[in-house]
């Protein structure tokens, strides 16, 4: 009771030495392979249990984009040195977390003592939406290390959402709605669809030849005249 569970501290850094494998993760708006990718499904499932157990949430961040495995607004992303997920045991008794993976599902139970006279159901409401667009990324034909084909989809599109979640409290005996309280406001980005457009690299052109300046000669005066006061000498003016 009173302790704070810190997901990153308990699970530790996701490394190959610790047994983690590479899977999809988000980085700078793109889907990339990363060690421990998918670990957020575990943190998100624990977070959902905390919501329906009405425990105090200390730190939680939504994903950049909507997750397919959780109801909107009930995910909790984590990253080593980045977003954290923490919750506090705000009950009067110890809590044990039981977690397993079976049949392709992450399954989590919080075992403790429930003193409440109500139970929780979560509701999600979309209060804003942003549609993606289609953009084309020009890729030189002779510099295409990824081997993209013309028209190939590089990045899939996601809609952006603003989601408000609510904790709905129901009486255990009558199932009557007691209260509907605002919980978390989650903002998910939209992601544009990116399509490869192969282009030819323009051939370099020869630089223009330098012009040789024409030789200039001093203009010659065709006439000669004798300077005054100087007899017997010829003069040339330039």
Image: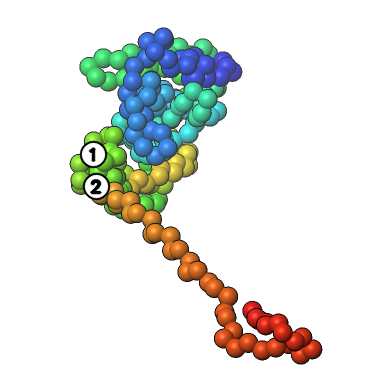
List x then y, in percent, for residue 42: 38, 21
| Residue 175 seen anywhere in this rendered image of the structure | no
Residue nearer the viewer, 33 or 158: 33
Whether 28 is drawn above or below 205: the answer is above
| Residue 198 seen anywhere in this rendered image of the structure | yes
List x then y, in percent, for residue 130: 36, 52
Whether residue 232 sits left or right of residue 116 in the image: it is right
User: Which tag, 1 or 2, sits closer to the chain's start?
Assistant: 1
CB within 8 Å, label 1 to label 2? yes
Q: Residue at left 30%, top 15%?
A: 101
Q: Residue at left 26%, top 14%?
A: 102
Q: In which quarter of the image is the N terminus?
A: top right
Query: Looking at the rendering, which quadrant does residue 97 occupy?
Result: top left
Query: Looking at the rendering, which quadrant does residue 53 occupy?
Result: top left
Whether 141 is drawn above or below 211: the answer is above
Whether 55 is drawn above or below 14: the answer is below
List x then y, in percent, for residue 212: 45, 63
Whether residue 213 sits left or right of residue 194 in the image: it is right
Whether residue 235 sits left or right of residue 146 in the image: it is right
Question: In this figure, which residue is indicated by the disc labeled 1?
Answer: 148
Under tag 1, what secondary structure?
loop
Q: Residue at left 66%, top 89%?
A: 225
Under tag 2, what secondary structure?
strand
Q: Residue at left 42%, top 37%?
A: 28
List x then y, in percent, for residue 216: 53, 72
Q: Residue furthest front?
A: 232
Measure the alpha-carbon separation of dots 1 and 2.
Answer: 8 Å
Residue 198 image label: 2
Crowd around label 1: few <14 · some 14–19 · many ≥20 (10 Å): some
């Amino acid at each position: 009771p009173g302790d704070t569970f810190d997901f990153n501290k308990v699970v530790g850094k996701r490394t190959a030495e610790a047994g983690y494998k590479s899977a999809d993760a988000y980085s700078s708006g793109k889907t990339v392979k990363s060690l421990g990718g998918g670990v957020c499904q575990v943190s998100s499932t624990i977070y959902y249990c905390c919501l329906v157990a009405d425990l105090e949430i200390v730190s939680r961040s939504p994903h950049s984009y909507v997750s397919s495995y959780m109801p909107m607004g009930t995910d909790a992303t984590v990253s080593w040195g980045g977003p954290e997920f923490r919750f506090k045991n705000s009950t009067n008794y110890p809590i044990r977390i039981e977690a397993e993976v079976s049949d392709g599902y992450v399954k989590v139970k919080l075992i403790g003592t429930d003193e409440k006279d109500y139970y929780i159901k979560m509701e999600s409401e979309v209060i804003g939406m942003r549609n993606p667009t289609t953009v084309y990324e020009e890729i030189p034909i002779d510099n295409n290390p990824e081997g993209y084909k013309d028209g190939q989809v590089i990045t899939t599109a996601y809609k952006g959402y603003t989601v408000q979640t609510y904790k709905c409290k129901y009486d255990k005996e009558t199932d009557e709605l007691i209260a509907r309280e605002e919980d978390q406001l989650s903002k998910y980005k939209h992601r544009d669809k990116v399509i490869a457009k192969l282009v030819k690299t323009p051939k370099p052109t020869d630089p223009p030849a330098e012009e040789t300046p024409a030789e200039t000669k001093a203009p010659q005066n065709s006439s000669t005249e004798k300077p005054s006061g100087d007899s017997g000498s010829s003069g040339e003016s330039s």
